[in-house]
Image (cartoon, coloured by chain):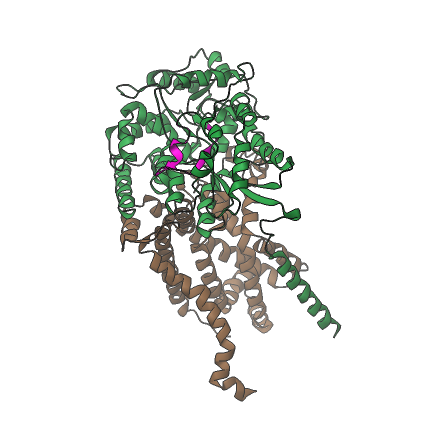
Amino acid sequence: MEKALRNKKTILFFVGPALILYLAVMLYPITHAIYISLFRWDLLGTPSFIGFQNYVRMFTRDAVLIRALQNTLGIFIGSLVGQLGLGFLFASMLAHGTKFKNLFRNFFFLPAVLSSAAVGSMWTFMYNPSAGIVNGFLRLIGLDVLARNWLTDENTALGAIIAVVIWQFTGYTMTLFMAAINGIPQEVYESAKIDGANPFQIMFRITLPLIMPIVRVATILITVGSLRFFDLVYVMTPGGGPNRMTEVIASLLFRRSFTHHEFGYGAALSVLLLVLSLIATLIVNRAFKRARHEY
Amino acid sequence: MKLRIILALLLVAMLTVALVACADEAGDAGADGEIEIAWMIWGAGAGSPDPIDQLIQRTADNFNALDNGITIDLQWTSGDVYYTRLPALIAAGTVPDIFATHAAGVLQTYTNAGRVLALNEFIDTDPEWRDHFIDGAFRLMTFDGNIYAIPWYYSAVPLFYNMDIFEAHGLVAPETYDDLLNVIAVLRDAGVTPFAFGARDAWTPALFMSMVANRIGGDGPFDAIMAGGGSWLDPSYIEAGYIMQELANVGAFPDDFMGLGADDMAAMFKAGEAAMYVMGSWAIAQVYADDSTVQGSISATKFPTLPGGVGDPNVWLGQPSITNAVSIDTPHPEAVMEFLKYWTSDEHQIFLGEAAGQIPATRVSLNPDAVSPLALYLNALIAESSGMFIFYDVGLGRAIGDEYNNVVQAILAMSDITQTLQNFQIFTDEVREAEE
């Protein structure tokens, strides 16, 4: 068996199908997108070659792109802080054996398995200024002055969406952290308690450093996921939001390609997104290189 | 062992369900060898309160009730995704046999790609049907001598206003821009929203600005652009941009108008929450819809003139509204034509004119008592028209036309007008260059 597994041909045979699938589904479309970004194409006619004009336009004449980049950054930072922070907090509280640990974990995780489109529809109703429960609740507890048009007010639209993103995905991060915390041997905690550490010190000086690899994984997942985030934004603010205040790169890409039939420009935007994601991942990897603790 | 069997059975069940669910639908021949024709149109569907939507559903249902071996499969699509979905279907070659469109530049994109059936041979073999259409009915859907769509009704854009609100504040219908500013000021002081207006669906503010531009500069600038020349930096467009921003600044529009879409605007006006509404005459159908509280309170007037403007107040923004085009791949052109003739038959055209208040595409005589007063009044106004120009996004086609909508949206967001128009001109030049 061992011999068979080491045989190069066998390895190729086992890896082959997955590799072909990967090339077909991942590599080919990416190369094709880079290729198409050099053309102007409306899907029905023949593509016409325009060189780097799409990129020139992107960097000099597209005011909405700057807004989209800002918004994408906003969602990225909001997601990172919200999901890592809340996820770690909840995981720490639950990991040490509350009676209903599994119940809570499932509850928090539930939104993550819901379809983003369904979540978006639901929250659009909840944010409805007259009939939604967000404003209804604020009015009920006497905070009328805080009630507003969450999704159509330029100042709150993006924040409202970030809140839903955090709501949907914190459970996912929390579950990852819980699994990681479970892997820490009890002796570490026992000796910490003996040494008189209080809960905060345990959380930040012991738990956090020991689960750094998982924090790194979670950060990469959140980074890549939030940079290319589309579903909730498109469902909750289909027109790009008030004054395009909730347009992100992915929704701008979709609008340019499918609504305005400029597939070349959309492809150029997708290349931009690819480059941004690669840069972000490199930065995250660099930042975590130094944090490696063993126990 | 038991667990294994259960798991295996579960796997088989899942796979079966997946295969069955993904099975292709039956082809054109339904049960009993019926010819099935798919018809795609925008609208709110069978349960819509809008009389035009109801009529569309009725034409399909009644045609299916006829025993002629043809079944119409009516596919409703939401208006805001219609022109996103249609080109994708056309490009994939799976577009339904009949699809609704606004003709002109929008249709031309598809005819240029050779995806639409030319209908001349069918029209010429039935001269009685052909001559029943009003003069020039096919003008905006004829390219290179080929007719590519059948019109249903025409729409024009007036300024609708709520007579009750106006009377309550001692106002009369505005004829000039100064009148309009006065009306807006009075209404704002009284806490009434002057215009049902939104900028989320970019075409709605676009039609408003097109009217302003036409009142300022006349037909010249847009005609030049339609002919392949002209310039978006024409003074009438720059001035129109300033007017739009001024209107926004004096509170002519609802406070959160940037986030309001076409449906929100209609709902606002139907509920009597706004005094004025600039929209195509299909809005008459909205006013008389089942859920409207303003039936009977609405009147219409021509769009006001602007100071120093050379535009003729009797020129209207108008176009064929719903037209039906036929896919070149349809296997049943004769059956399709039979339906299209039924669709434009007098009973439906008369309904469009009387109950929905539209301008029918065929020569039908309407019973004046059955026509809503609003429609009668509007049709009388339009009858004196000295010209009509088309919606920019329909006339200019998807690339430039849609970008125009975006430009108006950006201007309303207080962007620099000259800069925005300059970028738009560069964009237009690039698109034209690429199309050669």
Q: Position of residue A152 (x, y in %)?
A: 46, 37
Q: Position of residue A258 (x, y in %)?
A: 42, 47
Residue A13, can we see it? yes
Q: Is residue A218 above or below residue B58?
A: below
- Give the magenta part as a residue range: B136-153
Q: Is residue B120 above or below residue A186?
A: above
Q: Is residue A103 above or below residue A24?
A: above
- Dividing the picture into quadrants, the one containing residue B257 is top left
Query: Which residue is at a point 60% across and 49% down the rendered structure image?
Result: B29
Chain B palette colour: green
Q: Is B150 a magenta residue?
A: yes
Q: Is residue A65 above or below residue A105?
A: above
- Dividing the picture into quadrants, the one containing residue B84 is top left
- Dividing the picture into quadrants, the one containing residue A155 is top left
Query: Which residue is at a point 36% across and 57% down the rendered structure image?
Result: A271
| Horizontal side of residue A202 vs B310, given as left or right | right
Q: Position of residue A184 (x, y in %)?
A: 56, 71
Q: Position of residue A251 (x, y in %)?
A: 43, 48
Residue B409, can we see it? no
Q: Is B135 a magenta residue?
A: no
Chain A palette colour: brown
- Residue closer to the observer: B271 or B397: B397
Query: Which residue is at a point 32% across and 54% down the rendered structure image?
Result: A39
- Residue closer to the observer: B20 or B361: B361
| Quadrant in which the N terminus of chain B appears | bottom right
